[in-house]
Image (cartoon, rainbow, N blue to C red):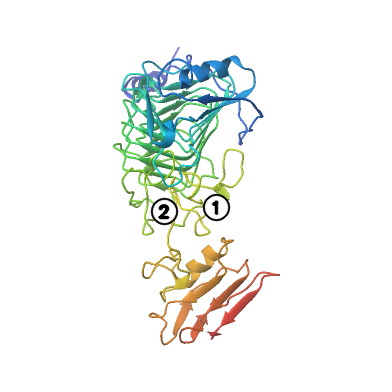
Amino acid sequence: MQSAGTSLVILALTSLMITGCQTTDITKYPSAPDQPKTWTAQDIQNTIVVTSVDDAGPGTLRNAIVQANASAGMDKIVFESSEGLYQQPQSIKLSSGLPDITDSLVIDGYIDNMLWKASGVTLDGQGRYQIIRIAKGVNAKIANLTFTAGHAERGGAIENLGNTVLSGVLLTDNRATEFGGAVFSSGSLYLINSTVHHNRAGQAGGGLFHERGYLKVTHATFDGNESPKGGALYSRVEGVLQNSILANSVSEQDCFAETAFAKESTANIIESSHLCGEVFSSADPGLGKLGGYNGSTRTIPVSSRSAAFNWADNAASVDETGAPLVWDQRGNGDPRFALGIADIGAFEVQPRVRFEVDTLSDEDIRGCTSARADCSLRGALQLLNNSDRHQRLGFDAEVFKDGGELRQKSALPAIIRDLTIDASAVGAVVLVGKSKLEPAEGVKLELINIKSR
């Protein structure tokens, strides 16, 4: 016989289940097995070329997926045309969802020989269809494509039940009546160097809803997504969120997790979050407008004045295999480590570098561009310690015309790369207090017109 107290607890729990956020039908999405924390690439068996932007027939993406599904092992689909079809942006307007991916597959929309020219392929669900679905247990990678105007109950653009990488993609203006405006995931998912913009879900996860399995989000930018809960991202697992921006959501929280995110979650800008790991900054990241700034997809820029600029965790700037990223979302032409330390988000600023200390401040100001007062000694050393392209640091002729004192309240970073710090063009620079410049063992440090006191 139940006690009165037990009955009250049961009634309270029942009330919460009825009135709270609805849950997905978990019987429809069987539990995914534990997944590795890196995605293992497989040998490509066949490369299938998409030569048409029609929705059906020979040379189309739809036909290519059917061919790949029928071919055992990992195949690759690319977009090429001897007729110059892809010399300008193209859109494939779907009359129904694409075939499910049921066998290992890479789909790569990168268009060669289009550096700094408009290019790319958009998959358009026309506001009526879910664009693509990855079947349970399937290894898939989708890269350098735009998904727009997808519509479904769960996962407006993409439904993932497999072991999937989304890299260098743009997901924009997709809608789900329930969960995952752009992506619904119930497998393992790696979202890397990608932008999730202006998607909407009726219940949770305006951009991304992750049900179960491994989740890792690296260098993503979520902007302007909408949902009653988790405007940008909603997760039911211990996800990993690194070097990403989640902002401007139409929701109480940009990021909502039912289970606290893993400790390796790092260097994220999240304006409002619940259990989504340690937040580096909740300030407005100052995102620009979605536009074509090179590459096969549109991106959202940040400026050198953004909190995202030069503040990523380089150790977390890796791809699905754990290898260091080379490019940002745009690919060839836009290095991920432009100034030594990566930017947070999908977009990497490619500034005009000016490694000159131009402030007396002891703060970690790590701009070092042509802007004024954006490069402190402490900040410059942080950048140069991570740069394999720059080995010289100077001083601004106006700020240090008659020399100057740099007072540090704590020890400066140890110098771990060969470096020349040169004040020969200005007055003597005096380091005061705990301002010793200490090279690591085996590192060559040359100081010119630098004194200590």
As helix, strand or loop, the secondary structure at mark 2 comes to loop
Contact (Cβ within 8 Å) of mark 2 with mark 1: no
Above or below, 288 relative to 133:
below
Mark 2 closeness class: few <14, some 14–19, many ≥20 residues within 10 Å: many
Left or right: residue 97 compared with residue 433: left
Left or right: residue 285 compared with residue 452: left
Position of residue 215 measured from the top left corner of the image (x, y, whole percent)? 52, 34
Position of residue 194 measured from the top left corner of the image (x, y, whole percent)? 45, 39
Position of residue 80 measured from the top left corner of the image (x, y, whole percent)? 50, 30
Q: Name the residue at the front extreme.
A: 83
As helix, strand or loop, the secondary structure at mark 1 comes to helix
Residue 40 seen in the current view:
yes
Q: Nearer the viewer, residue 62 or 170?
A: 62
Q: Name the residue at the left extreme.
A: 250
Q: What is the three-letter code of the residue carrying label 2?
A: Ala
User: Nearer the N terminus, badge 2 or badge 1?
Assistant: 2
Residue that badge 1 annotates: 314
Position of residue 95 measured from the top left corner of the image (x, y, whole percent)? 36, 16
What separation in Å lies between label 2 and label 1 (alpha carbons)?
13 Å
Q: What is the three-letter code of the residue carrying label 1?
A: Asn
Above or below, 364 relative to 44:
below
The residue depicted at 46 percent of the width and 57 percent of the height is 310
Q: Nearer the viewer, residue 205 or 199?
A: 199
Q: Which mark is residue 308?
A: 2
